[in-house]
Image (tube, grey):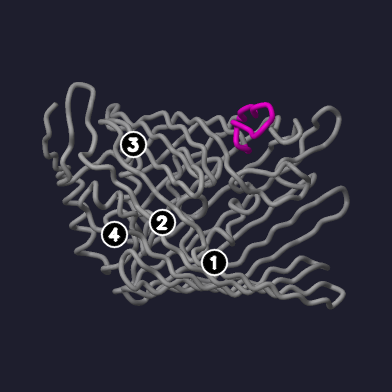
Amino acid sequence: MKKTLLSAAAFAVAGVSAVAMMPNSAEAIPAFARQTGAACLSCHFQTFPAVNAFGRSFKLNAFTDVGEEALVEDEGLSIPSVLNATFVLRAQYSLAKSSTAAGVTTSTRTWGIPADTVLLIAGRVGANTGAFVEFNGGAANWQLMNSFDLDGLKVGLNVANTGFGPTAALETSNVYGQHGGKLNGKAVSAVNTIIGGGSLNVAAAPNNGNTTSVALWTGNDSFTLQGAFVAYVDAAGAGGASANLVPLVRGTYVADLGGAELLIGGALTSGTQTTNVAGLTKGVDAKWVDLQIQGEMGDASYGVYGDWVSTKGKSVNGVLSNIFGGDKRDGFGIRGEIKPLHNVMFGLGYMSDKNTVGAVSTKTTTTQVAATYEVYQNMEINTFYSNQNVAGGTSTKTYFAEVEALM
């Protein structure tokens, strides 16, 4: 076998240009930075994990771009000479104060030191294949990406088992999912809250856990389109029968908006989900649209993000059921984020979530204010305050602070 140095010239030039034109900030996954030799803002908008045009291109290339890092190459082999990894350190504090309609108030104080132990291993597997694996006690997130050139388009077949949502096989939007987490933005995303990263498959339960997906996709700098089959639970199951896969179609379109960047996306999914929780079968019927606008005003950068989602029950064995909640569940979210200084960000968001069972509808609203201070490009202090109100029920105010460092 032979060891060679490859230099992705176009990628490097793009990365250097991005750093030259934009404020020097943002946190990146060091595993990718080591592989590409590119600075944080060559891929990220404002801060990790949101992506810009170069970050989307890196993902469409299946995380295979390299810079000055040596490759071990032979026939049918092209891997980095070292295993690129990232270790995440987090210390957290939260205080939640809840008040019921009857006037009963409780407070819950939580310290997390460490909050979790996360190891990320990511990057090139071969000339056309890359991977992203996140271990948090177990393999919490797992993505295998494949990308090929076809007459100016990228095409691929991706497999994912992640907590980043049903479109994670190829998600490039910063509204929800893998890239929507900055300033706790996913908490005021209707898609993330209602469609979520899986389902407990109990009526009106919050969606959580992993989804499994297999997606055939195509895209370029202007659009992405994926046709996927998704299990809205971990398809492998745990002590039960494996779940079936439900069809999903997801598309995004990117355009210039007077110097800013506009991304519009949408998705449709429909079928029935035989779950691995007590063998239940639930209806899957959802559609959503999402929008993001990202741009700069002088030395400041800003982002506006919004989504709307609607789900409804389907008849399964003569019974109306909805894996996402009641007979019908829909909502919308909107948030704005601004970075007035190179290491300071602020965000404001609002979400409405309405869950209907029979003739009764319950509306939950969430308002959130968030701020981030970047100590280094790979170390942040994050804070937020949220106020969640269930109409006629419980109101919960949460105060949160976190220190996060990536090695």
Label 3: element kind: strand
Q: Three-letter amino acid code at disc 3?
A: Gly
**Residue at position x 46%, y 71% in the image:** 382
Residue 272 in sight from this viewpoint: no
Q: Which residue is mark 3?
A: 130
In this rendering, position of residue 93 left or right of residue 206: left
**x 50%, y 73%: residue:** 383
Cα gap from disc 4 to disc 1, whole angstroms? 29 Å
Q: CA distance from mark 2 to mark 4?
A: 11 Å
The type of residue carrying mark 1 is Gly
Earlier along the polypeptide chain: callout 2 or callout 3?
2
Label located before the other in sequence (2 or 1): 2
Q: Is residue 313 above or below residue 292?
A: above
**Residue underneath mark 2:** 49
How many angstroms separate mark 4 from mark 3 (CA)?
21 Å
Task: Residue 128: give x, y in percent of width and height.
Answer: 29, 30
Whether tag 3 and tag 1 are in contact, CB under 8 A, the answer is no
Callout 3 crowding tier (Cα within 10 Å): few <14, some 14–19, many ≥20:
many
The crowding category of the residue bearing disc 1, from other C-alpha atoms within 10 Å (few below 14, some 14 to 19, many at least 20), is: few
Is 312 located above or below residue 110 in the figure? Answer: above
- What's the CA distance linking mark 2 and mark 3? 18 Å
